[in-house]
Structure formats: structure tokens, C-alpha cells
Amino acid sequence: MAQLRQDFEKFEQLNTVVVAIGPEKPEPFSAYFEEHDLPFRGIPDPDHRILRLYGQQIKLFKGGRMPAQVIIDRAGMVRYVHYGKGMADIPGNDELLRFLAELEEEE
């Protein structure tokens, strides 16, 4: 989440709402956001409802909930998905920002 925080303003400039969804229960999830003063929104998903909705995987032998990045356009259409194969398999902000800039040009 530190990576998202670092470039949060760049995401905002591209009219992007950043939402982090985590497996924790509401109390520890909120505490983490407060402790780290994260500027974006967060949604706890301890029952994995959102996880299942977007096809995110859980692999217990690889550390649990695999990373997933999903970009949804203003019409509610999924336009980009990256499912991580491991905990460190996360696209860089540059890749996401490039995609968002292209999407912004289309609209």
C-alpha cells in the first residue's frame, strides 16, 4: 500500500478513486489505515465477498490472499485485471498510471 500512497496524487489527477480491499475484519483494517494515515479508501472483506466477485485467489501455501489489481471504468466495466501469482507479483504504479491515462483519453 506504500506504493499506492506514494503516487496517490497522480492517480487523483487521472480522476481515479483508489480503493484497497483487505481480508481483515473492520477493526484491525481501520486501525491499519489510521496508523499509516493512508489517503485512499479501504474496505475490509473478511468474508471474501468482494474477492469472489472479482475472481481473486487464495493460495495458502503462497501466503494467503493473492494480490489483484482491478480497474473499473465510470460505466462499471472492468477494464484491467492483474492477478498476482505470488505476494510480490504486483504491477508498478507506472503501468497502472499509463493504462489510466490511455483510458482517460478514450473517454
Image (spheres, rainbow, N blue to C red):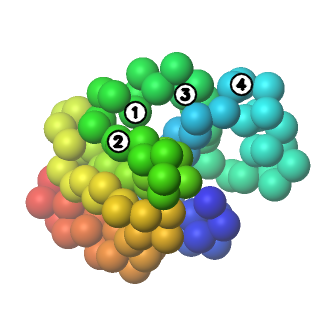
Q: Quadrant of the N terminus?
A: bottom right
Tag 4 near tag 3, CB within 8 Å:
no
Tell me which label, 1 or 4, sits earlier in the chain: 4
| Label 2 element class | loop
Q: Is residue 98 above or below residue 20?
A: below
Mark 1 and mark 2 residues within 8 Å of each other at the beta carbon? yes
- The alpha-carbon separation of the residues under discs 3 and 2 comes to 12 Å
| Residue highlighted by disc 1 | 51
Please tell me in which quadrant of the rendered image residue 43 appears.
top right
Look at 66% across and 33% down and name the residue there. Answer: 24
- For mark 4, what is the residue? 26
Q: Residue at x 50, y 63 (%)?
A: 87
Q: Label 3 is placed on what type of residue?
A: Asp
Q: CA distance from mark 4 to mark 3?
A: 8 Å
In the rendered image, residue 61, in percent from the top left (x then y), is placed at 48, 53
What is the three-letter code of the residue carrying label 4? Pro
Q: Who is closer to the viewer here, 70 or 22?
A: 22
User: Mark 1: which amino acid?
Assistant: Leu
Residue at the right extreme, as displayed: 35
Q: Which mark is residue 45?
A: 3
The crowding category of the residue bearing disc 1, from other C-alpha atoms within 10 Å (few below 14, some 14 to 19, many at least 20), is some
Q: Residue beneath label 2, please?
A: 56
Q: Nearer the viewer, mark 4 or mark 2?
A: 2
